[in-house]
Amino acid sequence: MASLHTTVHMPKWPIRWPVGLMAAMLTVVATGAGAADREARQWLERMSEALATRNYEGRFFHLRDERSEAMRIYHRVDRGKVTERLVSLDGSGREIIRNQTEVICYLPDRRTVLVEKRTDDNTLLAAVPAYNDQLEAHYNIERGPFTKALGRRTQVINVTPRDQFRYGYRLWLDDETAMPLKSQLCDRNGKVIEQILFAELNFRDRIPADSLKPSITGEGFRWIRQDAQPQLAAAGQAGGWGVIRLPAGFRLTAWRIQFIAGSSGPVQHLVYSDGLASVSVFIEPRNPQAEPVKGLAKVGAAFAFSRSLDDHQVTAVGEVPPVTLEAIAAGVTKDEAAAPTAPAPATNQSALPPPQPQQ
């Protein structure tokens, strides 16, 4: 059993909890061009394997805008089955549990539990996309120097965007285990936007099953379930809606219809991704009695850009540069001929309403 431990003291703040329940804390991408790139890819493959196959528990800090929140993660592998639990140690006490079939988010500050079908194999700590050659056109990956993190020797991996439409990453991978001890989200100029920093990381031969049980019963809470799977969309259209002139590399990967309290009709939720960065687009009927939301705003750690389109409100949200959101929102269009003749896939209720930016 390996043990990594240190202590960090930082101010505290409420962590973001993104739409769809999945907390994508660290994100990396690999490319296979050149000898140095091949070695960098091998580091990322080792990291992915360590995150997915090892038993570990630890404490880390999520830092943004000079504020931070302490989190604890438990990752248990038992006979090939993975269960995870992510716990906020500050303020709200929110928890996320991922088992074989579901992702469950307990929000005691809202007295709400959100339940969503599990749609991928990504861990709660890291969403490591599968490598494909198309990503190389939009990101460059290379090894940095060996340095120290958590008192351990680490290999720095730099992932940099090739244009203004996406962010980059810096990763500090433990030399012995390839676990990410530190991760930074950076803009195109290398300025740090947010980061993850482990304060303690322990590898275990076995993680007790009780460690994966929520500390919150959820009794008396409102339970909201999303039973339907997101649908893959063909020909760039989702229920008659689409985006023209997408930023290079982005494509429609999934869509769903959500029914949201307070909305005058079903809300279209479209997801666009380049395999690393992703943007959610919400299209809902506009309330004629309310002033439409327009322009750019912050939503937690992400940005949102909103505009009106005929009798609809369009909101694009994601951890991408504002220019990307503006371009995607501006390209939203309705093709009446492409609209489905039968009800599209729908959920019972949305986990969260579309973000409503405040100017």
Image (spheres, rainbow, N blue to C red):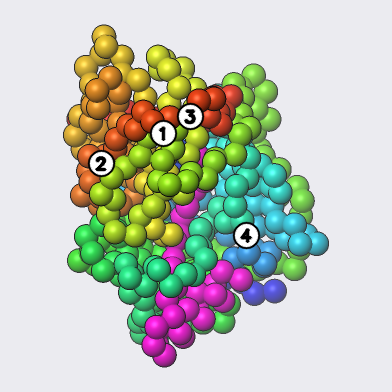
* Front position in the image: 186 or 247: 247
Residue visible at 61% across and 34% down in the picture = 228
Q: Which residue is mark 4?
A: 57
Mark pair 1, 2: CA separation: 16 Å
Residue name at image x 44 percent, y 33 percent: 239
Q: Alpha carbon of mark 3 to alpha carbon of mark 2: how far?
A: 20 Å
Residue 340 is situated, as x and y percent measured from the top left of the image, at 48, 29
| Dot 4 amino acid type | Glu
Q: Nearer the viewer, residue 296 or 150?
A: 296
Q: Secondary structure at mark 3?
A: loop
Q: Residue furthest bottom?
A: 35
The alpha-carbon separation of the residues under discs 4 and 2 comes to: 43 Å
Q: Residue at the far top: name it.
A: 289
Label 1 environment density (alpha carbons within 10 Å; few <14, some 14–19, many ≥20): some
Mark 3: amino acid? Pro
In this picture, which residue range is highlighted in magenta?
A: 20-49
Q: CA distance from mark 1 to mark 3?
A: 6 Å
Give, as a three-letter code, the residue at label 1: Ala
Q: Which mark is in front, 1 or 4?
A: 1
Where the N terminus falls, by quadrant? bottom right
Find residue 334 and report its image quarter.
top left
- The mark found on residue 340 in the picture is 3
Q: Is residue 181 visible?
A: yes
Q: Picture coordinates of residue 163 (x, y %)?
A: 23, 64
**Furthest residue toward front:** 337
**Which quadrant: the C terminus?**
top left
- Depth check, mark 3 against mark 2: the one in front is 3
> In terms of sequence position, does the residue under pointer 1 or pointer 4 come before the other?
4
**Quick one: SS at disc 2?**
loop
Mark 2, residue position: 331
Which residue is identified by label 1? 338
